[in-house]
Image (spheres, helix red, strand yellow):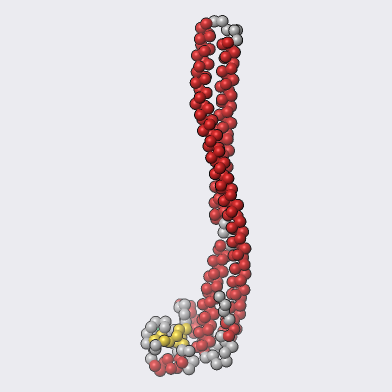
């Protein structure tokens, strides 16, 4: 938006109420720009999505480490089991044990141990596929983080530029506003400021004979005075009446 308020008060024929009306335009524009600035400032540094993705990745990493620990201990259990089977098998078939009763017992033991291998293998396979799954999810999250970082950096740059622009605009508006205020009769200025404390618009136009602040008809004598630039306040809402 381009605004050139400098033209407002350089008009030599501007009436008092005309000046107040332009002052109000500057004040309203200043308010809007300050609101925009605070919105931009709020968004600057705001990286919620990125922080959320990073903590998601941290959680996934924990899950992966947990699954890998379980895999390791499952592998150890398997090795242990196989080692036991080997050891007993040696006794069983090595010819060192002759006692038939003991041989029967050893056979039973091997059978019992072997029956445990199958389920343990299933657990191990389950863990391995779980690990693969987590690794795939982590890959996606890592890509998300890269993308979010890139987007965040771009956004920061745009917001940073916008912030500087709005700050410059505010400084200019403030300068123009104060320059204009200095030219306005101080009593009129006080009246304006007082009304502005409670109302967004202190100066309103009279259109169709009605105050545009409260829509009550303004007596002819009043709007005629307002038309020549006298400071006339609406009988009903106290706003300053302005006729171009
Ligand atoms: Zn009114």
Q: Quadrant for residue 179, please give it.
A: bottom right
Considering the image in quadrants, where does the N terminus appear? bottom right
Vertically, is 212 above or below 45?
below
Residue 62 place in picture, x, y as percent: 56, 41
Residue 5 place in picture, x, y as percent: 57, 82
Whether residue 166 appears in this view of the structure is yes
Q: Along the horizontal axis of the image, is 152 left or right of 212?
A: right
Q: Nearer the viewer, residue 92 or 205?
A: 92
Whether residue 237 appears in this view of the structure is no
Q: Residue at x 60, y 52 (%)?
A: 146
Tally the numbered discs: 0
Q: Residue at x 54, y 90 (%)?
A: 14
Q: Along the horizontal axis of the image, is 86 left or right of 104?
A: right
Residue 19 place in picture, x, y as percent: 53, 87
Vertically, is 136 above or below 30?
above
Q: Nearer the viewer, residue 20 or 6?
A: 6
Vertically, is 111 above or below 215?
above
Q: Residue at x 58, y 38 (%)?
A: 65
């Amino acid at each position: 938006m381009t605004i050139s308020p400098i033209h407002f008060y350089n008009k030599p024929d501007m009436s008092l109420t005309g000046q107040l009306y332009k002052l109000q335009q500057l004040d309203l524009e200043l308010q809007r720009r300050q609101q925009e600035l605070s919105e931009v400032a709020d968004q600057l540094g705001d990286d919620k999505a990125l922080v959320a993705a990073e903590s998601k990745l941290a959680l996934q990493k924990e899950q992966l480490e947990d699954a890998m620990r379980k895999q390791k201990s499952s592998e150890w259990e398997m090795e242990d089991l196989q080692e036991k089977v080997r050891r007993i098998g040696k006794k069983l078939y090595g010819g060192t044990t002759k006692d038939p009763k003991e041989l029967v017992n050893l056979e039973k033991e091997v059978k019992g141990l072997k029956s445990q291998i199958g389920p343990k293998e299933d657990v191990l396979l389950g863990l391995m596929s779980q690990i693969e799954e987590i690794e795939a999810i982590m890959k996606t999250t890592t890509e998300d983080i890269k993308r979010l970082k890139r987007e965040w950096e771009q956004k920061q740059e745009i917001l940073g530029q916008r912030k500087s622009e709005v700050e410059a605009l505010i400084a200019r508006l403030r300068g123009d506003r104060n320059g204009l205020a200095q030219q306005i009769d101080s009593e009129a200025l006080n009246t304006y400021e007082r009304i502005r404390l409670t109302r967004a618009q202190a100066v309103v136009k009279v259109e169709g004979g009605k105050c545009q602040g409260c829509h009550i008809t303004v007596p002819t004598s009043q709007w005629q005075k307002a038309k020549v630039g006298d400071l006339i306040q609406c009988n009903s809402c106290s706003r300053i009446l302005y006729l171009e």
